[in-house]
Amino acid sequence: MKKIYGCAVLSSALLLGGCVMAPGGDIDYSADQGPSMDEHVEVKGITFDLIRQQEAERKKVESQQTDNKTVSLDFANKLSSYEYEIGRGDILNIIVYDHPELTIPAGAERSSSDSGYVVQRDGTIFYPYVGRIRVEGKSVTQVRSIISSALQDYVADPQVNVNIASYRAKKAYVTGRVQNPGPQPITNIPLTLVDAVTQAGGVTNEADWHHIVLTRHGKRQVISLYDLLEDGYQGINGLIQDGDIIHVPDVGSQKVYVMGEVNRPQALPMGGYNLSLTDAIAQSGGIDELQAQPSGIFVIRRNADSDTSGKEATVYQLDISNSAAFVLGTEFELQPKDIVYVTAAPLARWNKVISLLLPSTNITRQGTSINNDF
């Protein structure tokens, strides 16, 4: 009876030993998988030719965009010609020099609304000797001219100055991943996209710089703040208008996933900068030199044109058996949702199998000892 028990223990150990061979093993699921995976995936080596090809494609895209110099000049013209138009709720400060009776006195304890003329809901203000004046939609220069002309019958050569004491009519809104979200007043100083984000305290570490959303009159426009700041493409740094909503989204899915034989597998955000393959590996603690296969660094990228190309994904392979190949990694730019996978060397896989087998050999030894005792 005791011999039977010893044999049973020994048999169990052998069975477990067969099971632990699964890691790194090759199990044939061809009966269930259908078509070969090769039909859906394209494999490319990361070489200097590939880097040159990608660089040529980037330059082609840039050449199709509007010339930066022309756009910058047009943008500068818009800034120089900008003039604020008065709106409802704004408070005007009007001074007629040498005629204090026509000027509301200002004081340290008087608010701007007490010492100025508030633009009413109908877009008008009331001014002595002139009556109601429609000022909505007009510049301060135009209002000054209207008041000067109307006072000619009462004041000889009136010297009038008009300015805006408080801007309360027009606002834009900055939301999302910025330090101080909230309304941004639109004033006589032109407000650009960069200005609005900067006045909101700048973006946070979790911000997606590539997909800033500008909503105007119900229409959404996606803008890359990264391209604007990195390349100086002023064509997308437009003037912000009343009611605009600028939303800075969370980095969300804009990440690269680093897995396999690296020291710190993780998801790396790509919100505010470009990321090369070498950057991603370095930020993940580097490859595990005892475990990693030098020729087995892969980047798996889903194809956007899978319907036309017939390939669901492209797998890029980097071989760093020669350390000089790291130069290729610094030039290979990753894209959001890329998967970087570092495979294990055959010896490392064998070591893992052995480590899993060790508990089984202990059980076998115990079973043999029991069998010898009886």
Image (cartoon, rainbow, N blue to C red):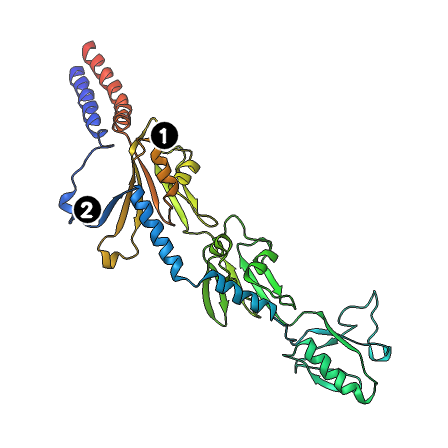
User: Can residue 67 be spotted in the picture?
Assistant: yes
Percent position (x, y) of residue 269? 44, 46
Distance of label 2 from label 1 (alpha carbons): 28 Å
Which numbered disc flags the more N-terminal residue, 2 or 1?
2
Q: Amino acid at mark 2?
A: Asp
* For residue 237, above or below residue 134: above
- Binning the other alpha carbons within 10 Å of mark 1 as few (below 14), some (14 to 19) or many (20 upward) gives some
Q: Which mark is residue 38?
A: 2
- Binning the other alpha carbons within 10 Å of mark 2 as few (below 14), some (14 to 19) or many (20 upward) gives few
Q: Indicate the quadrant containing the C terminus: top left, top right, bottom left or bottom right.
A: top left
Q: Which mark is residue 52?
A: none
* For residue 369, above or below residue 89: above
* For residue 343, above or below residue 58: above
Horizontal side of 107 relative to 63 (left or right) equals: right
Percent position (x, y) of residue 314? 27, 48
Percent position (x, y) of residue 64? 38, 61
Q: Residue at x 40, y 40 (%)?
A: 280
Q: Amino acid at mark 1?
A: Asp
Horizontal side of 298 relative to 73 (left or right) equals: left
Horizontal side of 131 relative to 203 (left or right) equals: right
Query: On the image, numbered disc 1 is attached to which residue?
Result: 288
